[in-house]
Structure formats: C-alpha cells, structure tokens
Image: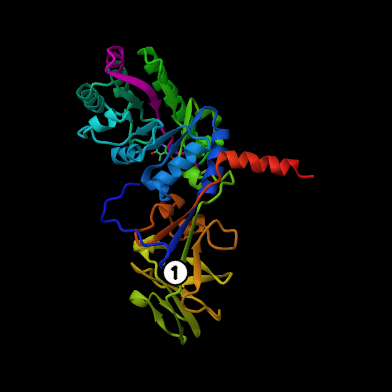
C-alpha cells in the first residue's frame, strides 16, 4: 500500500512485535469462496486488506479466483491503480463533494447511492472525457449506505438517461444484507426481496447491462439465493467466517518477545489502577504490545497468550505500549518469543478468541494493528506450482 511517509514500519529484523501474514491461507480461502460463488468473486480489500496488506491481499486474491476488487475510499482505489493493478476496482463510499475525476480517468468503478452522487460522477466523466462506470447502490435494509426505495426510481431514471447519452455506463446494481451472519434471520429474506424489487425497477428503466450483487462473506457461504452475478467478500479472504459455518484459514500470527520477567509476591498490584492484585507468588512477563499496537484494551483481564506451549493469562489493564502476562512457574526468560494470536495450530489463541475477550468482532481485531508492529509476509505458491504439486500427489503410489 502506498503509505504516507510518516508511517514508518519497523524492520522485521528488529526484535519487536511481529505480524506474520500467510498469503497461502488467503489463496486457499479465495479459492474456496470463488468455488462457492455462483457468479464471479469480488475481493473486498478495504482497510488495508482487512489489516493484512492492501496489495498483498489484492494480488493474492486476483491470482487465486477473484476477478475484481472492492474498496470503500477513492484513496484505496487509487493506491491499487498506482501499484499497477489493472483489474476492475469498485469504490463505494465517498461524499458527493469528492473529486471523482482521477478515479474516472483511472477507470475506477464508482457506486452512486444518490442523485447528488450520480451528478458529481457524471460531471467528473464530462470533465475527463470518458464515461464513468457506475454501480447504483440500494439500501436493502441497513439504513446506512444506499438509496431508499423512495429515491430509487428517480435515481434509475436519471442514470438511464445518462447511460443512453453515453456519459456513463451503469454496470452494477448493489445492495447489502444486515443480518447475513445469522442465516435463519427473517431480515435476510426481507433484504433479498427488497433487492429483487430494486433490480426490477432498474431493469424497467432500461438498465439491462448492470450486474447485480448483494452477498458478502456470510451470504456467500450460506445463501446461494443471494449470489446473483457477483459476491463481494472481504472477511472470508482473511479467514473470518461471520456465519460460523465454514472452516477458513486464519492468515495472521502475532508474536512478541518478553521484554522482562520478574518474580512478585502475593498481593502485588499489577499495572495502572491495580485492577489486578496477585493472589500468589508468581512470575510476571512483560510484552511490548499494547492497545496502540492492536491489543484491545477491552480485553484487559481476559486475554491469554502462548508461552513455551502453555496458555498464560494477561493481568491488569492493557496499557498503550505494554501488556503483563502471568507466567506462573514457567521458566521463561527475557527475549523468549510469545505467540499472542494465530491460527490456533499450536494451541495459541485465535483471532476469534481475542474478539470474544474484547467483546468485539474478529474484523475489529485484525484491522487494529498499529504501525509499530513489523510485518513478515509468507508468499503463496503460484497456481501453476499448485497444479504441479497436485499432480505429484496424484502420481504417488
Ligand atoms: C465490507 C463490505 C463487504 C465485505 O463484507 P465481508 O462480510 O467482510 O465479506 C461487502 N459489501 C460492502 C458494502 C461492505 O462494506
């Protein structure tokens, strides 16, 4: 991702906290999701690829089954284009006062949730001298983004006029489901039916070319009737299944070294406010990660980490830069590596557990890591090498 110069990521060779990103897991998840989607797959790489790296997630997903990319901001879309990514990119969250000209010039597809947006995008297209590629965005039940049913017909008619005059092309109709993480929720059928009505209105206005898309990760995994022409998946790429139905691979491991280890007697207050007081003699380890690095402060008193194969509890309040771990009688030494979270293969806590400890979502945990955390990227095997190794496996006796 093109980052502002003041965001300085530490050298991975320095002994601080380190996030390992497993692009092989993202490749596997992408292929599973592309396989499930009835139509094509859009990789949603907003928020720095859900904290896993905008460009790494985008290129991995495009290599393993996604055919387009989705982001919220224009800045994210332009960063993809600046990096040389030529695949279709949709950006769906800008005020109508935004300057859409660079995006139109770069062929970035733009969502229009209102007439104001449509006018701004059309003006940009006129200024640039090329038609804008537009997705009309309908509110299918979140009362958040998208046009309401009242505003929709007028939006479609105005877009159809512009489309007919060649000033823009309406290439998509989009909605979003509010409760797809609970497959049985009646709001899902209500959202699907609302979308069908929005689509019918758009078709009646002559918008025949537009492809329809409604499903995100949860609906992609649980509700084929919501798939239409395209599924927009983000969380699932990085191993998060909000519906809890499908085994996806987590792509992140956070490790940190112990900065110090100290023995303390029973009755020792730990950290700010002494919210924890030790009940027995024990050994306290100090980790150089706090809430500025992505350890949720709301996990204070509940979080666990893996030290030499054993789960250890964190104690007291998580500080901005540091977290205290109860090592008990473990013979841990300063400099030893602690696994804070990961896929769970070795017994380390998962992103899902950290989300529960902080009364939040895995999405919130994976997008929360700060700039002091170094990153190591493990590449995915190329599809060609995969094909070769699959043949190897088959040809074995
Ligand atoms: C973030 C987002 C998505 C992707 O959702 P996931 O549940 O992460 O797959 C899809 N559509 C819209 C409008 C979004 O904002």
Is the residue indicated by label 1 positioned so its CB lies within 8 Å of ligand 1? no
User: Which residue is rendered at x = 42% and y = 84% of the image?
Assistant: 268
Q: Identify the colour scheme used.
A: rainbow
Asked whether residue 180 appears in the rendered view, the answer is no
- Looking at the picture, tell me which residue is in the foreground, 258 or 239: 258
Quarter of the view holding residue 269: bottom left
Tally of marks: 1
User: Which residue is rendered at x = 27% and y = 28% of the image?
Assistant: 105
Query: Is 40 within the magenta?
Result: no
Provide residue 357's location: percent of width, then percent of height: 46, 61
- Looking at the picture, tell me which residue is in the foreground, 81 or 147: 81
Quarter of the view holding residue 289: bottom left
Please identify the quadrant where the C terminus is shown: top right
| Mark 1 element type | loop
Provide residue 262's location: percent of width, then percent of height: 45, 83
Quarter of the view holding residue 12: bottom left
Check the image and name the residue furthest to the bottom: 265
Q: Is 330 drawn above or below residue 175 in the view shown?
A: below
Residue on which disc 1 sits = 301
Provide residue 154's location: percent of width, then percent of height: 28, 18
Q: Is 155 drawn above or below residue 336 in the view shown?
A: above
Q: Is 332 drawn above or below residue 291 in the view shown?
A: below
Q: Residues within 10 Å of mark 1 (few under 14, many from 20)?
A: some
- Looking at the picture, tell me which residue is in the foreground, 19 or 71: 19
Query: Is 171 within the magenta?
Result: yes
User: Which residue is rendered at x = 34% and y = 62% of the image?
Assistant: 292
The answer to whether residue 261 is left or right of residue 155 is right
Provide residue 379's location: percent of width, then percent of height: 51, 49
Magenta segment boundaries in residue numbering? 159-181
Asked whether residue 226 appears in the rendered view, the answer is yes
Query: Which quadrant of the render holds ligand 1?
Result: top left
């Amino acid at each position: 991702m093109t980052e502002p110069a003041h965001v300085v990521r530490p050298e991975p060779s320095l002994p601080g906290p380190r996030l390992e990103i497993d692009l092989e897991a993202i490749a596997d998840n992408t292929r599973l999701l592309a396989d499930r989607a009835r139509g094509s797959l859009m990789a949603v790489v907003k928020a720095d690829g859900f904290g896993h790296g905008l460009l790494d997630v985008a290129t991995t997903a495009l290599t393993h089954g996604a055919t387009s990319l989705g982001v919220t901001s224009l800045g994210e879309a332009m960063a993809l284009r600046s990096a040389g990514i030529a695949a279709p990119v949709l950006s769906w969250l800008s005020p109508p006062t935004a300057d859409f000209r660079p995006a139109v010039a770069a062929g970035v597809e733009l969502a229009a949730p209102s007439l104001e947006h449509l006018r701004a995008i059309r003006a940009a297209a006129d200024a640039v001298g090329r038609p804008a590629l537009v997705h009309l965005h309908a509110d299918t039940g979140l009362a958040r983004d998208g046009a309401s049913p009242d505003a929709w017909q007028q939006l479609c008619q105005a877009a159809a006029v512009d489309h007919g005059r060649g000033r823009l092309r309406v290439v998509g109709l989009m909605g979003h489901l509010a409760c797809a993480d609970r497959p049985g929720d009646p709001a899902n059928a209500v959202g699907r039916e609302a979308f069908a009505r929005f689509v019918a209105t758009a078709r009646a206005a002559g918008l025949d070319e537009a492809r329809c898309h409604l499903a995100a990760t949860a609906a992609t995994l649980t509700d084929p009737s919501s798939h239409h022409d395209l599924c927009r998946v983000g969380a699932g790429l990085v191993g998060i299944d909000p519906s809890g139905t499908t085994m996806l691979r987590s792509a992140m491991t956070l490790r940190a070294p112990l900065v110090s280890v100290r023995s303390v007697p029973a009755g020792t207050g730990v950290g700010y406010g002494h919210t924890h007081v030790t009940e027995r003699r024990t050994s306290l380890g100090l980790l150089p990660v706090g809430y500025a690095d992505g350890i949720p402060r709301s996990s204070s008193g509940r979080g666990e980490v893996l030290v030499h194969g054993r789960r250890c509890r964190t104690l007291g309040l998580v500080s901005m830069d540091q977290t205290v771990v109860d090592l008990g009688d473990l013979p841990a030494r300063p400099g030893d590596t602690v696994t804070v979270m990961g896929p769970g293969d070795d017994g380390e806590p998962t992103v899902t557990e950290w989300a529960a400890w902080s009364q939040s979502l895995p999405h919130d945990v994976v997008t929360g890591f700060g700039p002091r955390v170094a990153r190591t990227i493990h590449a995915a095997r190329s599809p060609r090498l995969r094909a070769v190794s699959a043949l190897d496996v088959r040809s074995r006796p």
